[in-house]
Image (cartoon, helix red, strand yellow):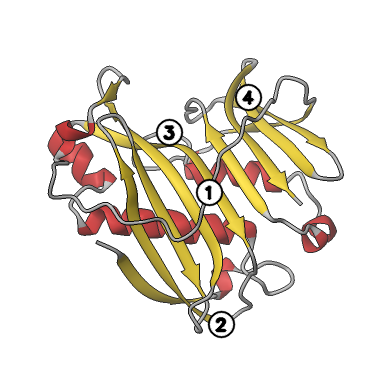
Amino acid sequence: MIYTKSQIASSSLIDANAHISFIGLFDVIEDAITECMGSLCLDGVTVKRDYNAFWVFTKNKIRLFERPVWGEEFSVESFISSLSSAKMVVDTALKKSDGTIWAYSSCEMCVLDIETGRIRRTSTVGIDDTIAVETPQCEICFSKIDDSYIPPIETVKVRSTNVDYSRHCNNVEYMRFLFNTYTVGELSELPVKDIEVYYVSQSYEGDELTVHKAVSSEYDVLAVKKGGSTVIKCRITH
């Protein structure tokens, strides 16, 4: 099943140049994934209520070809592209009015038990052989990200508005921490091709986090760490 909807580049999604911002891009993709899961009764709220579990994103890679401007219409297609006993991959294609893809995301997820925090089999939250798996529309390959060498540049604290219904810092909020290390001018000129993120662990309200960053001519490597341990790491390819 492919979940499909129409959307516009609204004012809440755009940046200083009136294009969909990088944070807006992550917002659109997160909404599409959760709505797709909701259409299958597999969304986080249902899984938490009925199975005492919750979904976490483990990694996501976005290939970016173009960004719509304010008021521009586009379509969103979200679907399961891979499914195993331990994880699920949900792809999201964002398309212009002529059907061409302007951004494409491949997001890997797993389900954790609320009480133990351990990974549970996907079959324990209502997933069975009736769940359709669709063919990916774009080839996405993940790579290794080494964040051991990058220096800290600032400290942030997880506040109440960073926390979602799973009671941990939401994945989009981490991207806000990372993109806030760029100036408006730098973001305006950043020719992003890919954004690859690994969600390694979780953080919670009140946690003190350090943001790390290293810049090169081909890509930037960023990370958020808690007590020296990686929470997320990211590579932005120019």
Amino acid type of the residue tagged 1 in the rendering: Ile
Nearest to the observer: residue 154 or residue 117: 117
Q: Is residue 218 above or below residue 92?
A: above
Tell me the distance, in whole angstroms, between the alpha carbons under discs 2 and 4: 37 Å
Comes first in the chain, label 1 or label 4: 1
- What amino acid type is highlighted by mark number 3? His
Q: Which mark is residue 168?
A: 3
Mark sitting earlier along the chain (3/2): 2
Q: Nearer the viewer, residue 204 or 19?
A: 19
Q: Is 178 situated left or right of 78 in this image?
A: right
- Residue linked to disc 4: 225
Residue 140 is marked as: 1
Say which amino acid is labelled 4.
Lys
Query: Which callout, 3 or 4, points to the residue nearer the camera?
Result: 4
Identity of the residue drawn at 69% across and 25% down: 146
Q: Are marks 2 and 4 in contact (CB under 8 Å)?
A: no
